[in-house]
Amino acid sequence: MTARGTAVVTGAGQGIGRAIVERLAADGYDVLGLDVQGLDALGAETGCRTAQVDVSDPAQVADVADLAPDCRVLVNNAAIQRYQDLLHTTPEEMRSILDINVMGPVLMAQALVPVMARNGGGSVINLSSITSVAHAAGTSLYPASKAAINQITQAMAVEFGALGVRCNAVGPGTVLTEGTAGHYGDESAQAAIAGTLPLGRMGGPRDIADAVGFLCSDEASWITGQTLFVDGGYTAAHGQFFRWARKAPK
């Protein structure tokens, strides 16, 4: 344990989640990384504590409070995505998206916000997405689940404020990770995508982790209920982006 307390990060095994673990550890938190895979490498390479937890399982989530009695930060990063159209999304796939992406953050908050309140307050960061406001076809219920996160973030901010707990969301844009690199095509396709963004590059996991670190910090002590899109200007120019996408090389 550290003087800053524990930061719990879900979906910590790779990509954005791992970068958030590294940033919060550098900021002085005792980080507890949760995931269903990739934990051996995460623990060995970052030195953080780890636990295998399915965020859609209420019993497993409830046990997390015992692992983080000095919790001050919760980052709800765990999520799944299905690249397919709505007409072919099965009921089982729908339930898994909503259980993990929507119910998971609520269950985690139910487990850890009372802990934060007893510790004098804290911060919840939910991971949203640009797809919550700039929809793309063939992404099933993922955009709907992230739009729900934006609203849940506001509800948490209103309900948890009196407990000394702030709640904000970070909405990543086109971020290259182990899980998304294939979706964005080869290097030439990625370069073309980057060229359509106002800042001229795609994002990396550290870009998102730095935003999370800021929202957890004292510098953000009067910020709650907000969704911060970290997207290189995508949401400001998404009409231009989608016009380009129709002509993009396959």
Image (cartoon, rainbow, N blue to C red):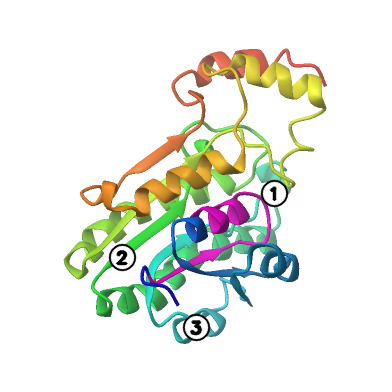
Residue 126 x %, y %: 44, 55
Residue hosting label 3: 67
- Label 2, secondary structure: give it: strand
* 1 or 2: tag closer to the N-terminus: 1
Residue hosting label 1: 82
Q: Is residue 157 left or right of residue 39?
A: left
Badge count: 3
Q: Is residue 158 above or below residue 183?
A: below
Q: What type is the residue that disc 3 sits on?
A: Leu
Circles 3 and 1: CB distance less than 8 Å?
no
Q: Is residue 51 left or right of residue 88?
A: left
**Quarter location, residue 53:** bottom right
Residue 238 x %, y %: 52, 21
Mark sitting on residue 190: none
Residue depicted at x 38% and y 46%: 214
- Magenta stretch in the rendered image: 5-23
Q: What whole-number distance in Å separates the C-alpha atoms at marks 3 and 2? A: 17 Å
Q: What type is the residue that disc 2 sits on?
A: Gly
Q: Is residue 150 magenta?
A: no
Q: Is residue 4 above or below residue 203?
A: below
Mark sitting on residue 122: 2
